[in-house]
Amino acid sequence: MRASVYRNFVFRLHPATTAKARKITMSESDQSIGFSAPRLVAKKVLAKLQHEGQGAVVRRSIGRSELKFLDPFLMLDEFSVSPPAGFPDHPHRGFETVTYMLQGGITHQDFAGHKGTIHTGDVQWMTAGRGIIHSEMPAGEGEQKGLQLWINLSSRDKMIEPGYQELLSHDIRTAEKDGVEVRIIAGKSMGVQSPVYTRTPTMYLDFTMKPRTQMHQSIPESWNGFVYIIEGEGVFGKQSSSPVTAHHVLVLGPGDGLSVWNRASTPLRFVLIAGQPINEPVVQYGPFVMNTQAEIDRTLEDYHYSKNGFEMAKYWRSQ
Ligand code: FJE
Ligand code: FE
């Protein structure tokens, strides 16, 4: 990959080439890649099926033992729930959950009276902050599928008021170029910016690549990033890599962008997620994520005695 990137630049810097080479230059410069140090795949892990919640099935990628944490990301689950399974009343503190529906719907209700259903293509960006108790249950018959990402908050944001950003599918901006479509959930791609406010600076892009296409996406150099493959198979990082199939997570090494090739005869769909590392200690106890054990102890007390953000827990139960 490095070699062909350099070849592009060399062509652009030296227009005095043969007619044949110039022709190649023209077509290559159309796909201006926009970065100079391609990130390679540093680690590849298969997200195997496991049971979570009540009767739900998830493929956990970030958050499994081989890949416990990728600062600022705590967890990524590809989930599948069919009634009566789901994620009944449970708390969160100290981070954000981002739920992106791939098929069907999830109804959420929280202890502050917030209630709603998100459907295929919709996103719920929930800031748990100092405390949320909610349920997340399937909204229809059959399999309801999606991705849930947990993003850590910095110590200064862990105890903020909880809040929601909801993005309906038709409000999610998309861009398309040369057979590659991107839905921009957070951050910017192909010149299009998402309206989502990310307290922890985050990029969240959903790419679908037609067979025999390639794409190049820039990623801030200081951020950690990964890919999770939803469907199909693709070549990531450099052209000579072996293709990787669905349900794998790929941690990206250092660099300022990612190149991907779909050489298969079926579409490739994956999410590219990257974020600015927080670089603080993380102490996690299930759905509570703080900086120290003392803060976790206080959180368990707050939850138990319904205080410091968990006041509404006293009487509330989901319907
Ligand atoms: C949780 C176990 C859990 N992945 N994907 C323990 F299952 C959960 C939890 C979820 C979850 C919910 C949805 Cl809608 C999708 C998920 C885990 O709710 F929070 C803890 N602590
Ligand atoms: Fe939850």
Image: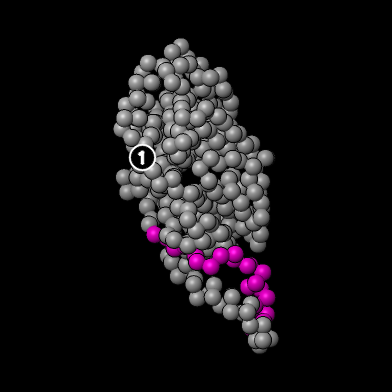
Position of residue 154 measured from the top left corner of the image (x, y, whole percent) = 45, 39
Q: Give the image quarter of residue 31.
A: bottom right
Q: Is residue 249 above or below residue 136?
A: below
In this rendering, does residue 269 appear at all? yes
Q: Position of residue 142 (x, y in %)?
A: 51, 32
Task: Provide residue 109's location: percent of width, then percent of height.
Answer: 53, 23
Residue 104 visible (yes or no) = no
Residue sticking out furthest to the top: 315
Magenta segment: 21-42
Q: Disc 1 residue type?
A: Val
Local SS, label 1: loop
Residue in the image at 59% along x and 48% along y: 187
Q: Which residue is mark 1?
A: 282
Question: x and y percent of residue 148 in the render?
Answer: 48, 38
> Image point 58% across, 37% down: which residue?
123
The way the protein has been coloured in the rendering is one colour
